[in-house]
Image (cartoon, grey):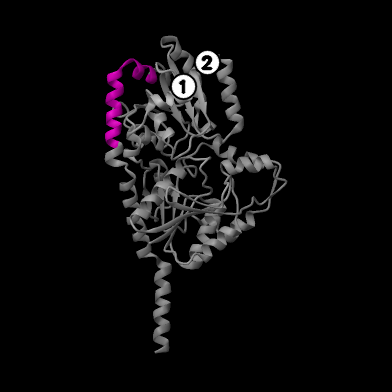
């Protein structure tokens, strides 16, 4: 099969769960003998073409259809939620030499471009919902469009042209990483193929790490009891909760150390986070690293440097970092939100809490720090589940089955073949 994957952007320095899903899927599709590449706008990118871990990535120019859009607003839209457009993307998809299927990892106008070209070429397309369509707090959704305040949008006609509002309605299949979003999408589209396809992990990669090396490299004391949070520095990820819980933890254990790792997608929130750490006088107990190279050993070592992994998000469609922590053999404490409760069983392979309950979060962490055997039992249960149910090989095999099914059932292709047969008959 020939498949092209289309995310809204794809760069090493601004990495997240979606980028991990796309890259790991493409790597395994190539190993299975399929042809695939990543094609996307060049937002935040330094190169128009590169190969990342064997996967070709091609990027094309784009623009935001707004008048009076400030440069800093454009950068914020690039980082998160920007509804951009690209004629170059449309041309690249049209000119693609052979294509069996388009896999969209975004909606809005970019998704509309994928839909438009797929229909022109009479091939199917599928859409992955990585969160942020139905299962997202209203306050967070408003923050995505906040940078456009004061600007004048003229791009609605472009969205109408490519059918951006029909991306889901016309998709051959909709893949949801979160179970709650899958249920809501099925409710809205009762007659469509809506599939819960969770994220995955490479168990072998995360099983081997050097936590002591990571601590030396980043100045974290060997005796520290490290609580790791991995995720974008953004209000959605709620690192502020971890900062507020830390002083209480330090009252009973002065060796507790908070490690926050992730690319900064909200500069104002990052500044507020740093200011709060300073105001609470806990600077020497907090390390903030604004992103690590996605494919680096340093990222794997970070998990092995931790005693407890914490995911305090207020919204989380799935939580791929939980799988990574499990694969590294680390106990997990996580918010009971979004897709997390669909695969983390409280008390068996993780501890769950309400993201607005600082006391419950602190108690869960304290319980694990005080009981090594409890940490080990949760970590081992999580490790076994990650390897048994969530390996990328297993997830990609399921994805290939979906591809083959929608290609085989493609009504546009069947109509095209019927027309060709009719024409042959006519000329005989």
Tell me where residue 403 sits by quadrant: bottom left
The quadrant in which the C terminus is found is bottom left
Cα separation between marks 2 and 1: 10 Å
Q: Horizontal and vertical percent for residue 245?
A: 47, 18
Identify whether 234 is placed above or below 415: above
Q: Residue furthest bottom?
A: 428
Q: Residue furthest top?
A: 251
Horizontally, is 254 left or right of 377 in the view? right
Disc 1, SS: strand
Which residue lies under the disc numbered 2?
282
Where is residue 351 shown, x and y percent of the image? 35, 26
User: Is 94 drawn above or below residue 68 in the view shown?
Assistant: below
Report if residue 375 lies within the magenta region. yes
Mark 1: few, some, or many residues within 10 Å (few <14, many ≥20)? many
The one nearer the camera, 266 or 177, is 266
Residue 267, picture quadrant: top right
Q: Answer whether residue 251 is magenta in the image.
A: no
Residue 329 in view = yes
Nearer to the camera, 370 or 416: 370
**Quick check: 31 above or below 359?**
below
Label the magenta part by its dominant secondary structure: helix
Quadrant including the N terminus: bottom left
Residue 258, numbered circle:
1
Q: Residue at x 41, y 38 (%)?
A: 318
Is residue 305 at least partly visible in the picture? no
Which region shows up in magenta? Answer: 364-385
Neighbour tally class for label 2: few under 14, some 14-19, many 20 plus, Cα within 10 Å: some
Label 2: which secondary element: loop
Q: Is residue 280 left or right of residue 190?
A: right
Is 383 in front, or is 311? 383
């Amino acid at each position: 099969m020939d498949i092209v994957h289309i995310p809204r952007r794809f760069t090493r320095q601004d990495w997240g769960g979606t980028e991990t899903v796309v890259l790991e899927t493409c790597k395994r599709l190539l190993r299975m003998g399929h042809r695939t590449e990543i094609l996307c706008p060049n937002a935040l990118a330094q190169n128009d073409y590169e190969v990342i871990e064997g996967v070709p990535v091609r990027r094309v120019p784009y623009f935001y259809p707004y008048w009076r859009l400030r440069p800093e607003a454009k950068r914020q839209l690039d980082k998160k939620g920007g509804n951009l457009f690209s004629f170059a993307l449309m041309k690249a998809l049209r000119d693609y030499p052979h294509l069996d299927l388009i896999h969209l990892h975004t909606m809005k106008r970019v998704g509309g471009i994928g839909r438009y070209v797929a229909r022109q070429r009479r091939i199917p397309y599928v859409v992955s919902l990585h969160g942020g369509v139905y299962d997202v707090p209203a306050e967070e959704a408003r923050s995505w469009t906040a940078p456009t305040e004061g600007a004048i949008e003229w791009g609605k006609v472009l969205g109408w042209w490519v059918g951006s509002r029909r991306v889901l309605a016309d998709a051959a299949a909709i893949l949801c990483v979160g179970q709650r979003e899958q249920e809501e999408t099925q409710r809205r589209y009762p007659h469509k193929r809506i599939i819960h396809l969770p994220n995955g992990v490479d168990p072998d990669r995360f099983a081997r790490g050097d936590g002591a090396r990571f601590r030396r490299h980043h100045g974290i004391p060997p005796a520290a009891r490290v609580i790791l949070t991995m995720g974008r520095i953004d209000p959605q990820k709620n690192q502020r909760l971890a900062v507020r819980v830390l002083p209480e933890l330090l009252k009973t254990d002065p060796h507790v150390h908070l490690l926050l790792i992730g690319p900064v997608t909200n500069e104002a929130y990052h500044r507020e986070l740093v200011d709060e750490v300073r105001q609470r006088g806990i600077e020497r107990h907090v390390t903030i690293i604004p992103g690590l190279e996605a494919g680096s050993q340093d990222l794997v070592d970070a998990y092995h440097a931790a005693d407890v992994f914490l995911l305090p998000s207020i919204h989380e469609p799935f939580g791929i970092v939980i799988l990574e922590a499990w694969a590294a053999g680390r106990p997990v404490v996580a918010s009971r939100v979004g897709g997390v409760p669909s695969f983390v069983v409280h008390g068996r392979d993780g501890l769950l809490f309400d993201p607005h309950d600082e006391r419950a979060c602190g108690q869960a962490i304290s319980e694990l720090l005080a009981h090594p055997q409890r940490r080990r039992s949760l970590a081992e249960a999580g490790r076994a589940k990650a390897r048994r149910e969530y390996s990328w090989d297993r997830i990609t095999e399921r994805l290939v089955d979906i591809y083959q099914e929608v290609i085989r059932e493609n009504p546009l292709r069947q109509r095209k073949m019927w027309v060709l047969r009719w024409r042959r008959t006519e000329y005989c």
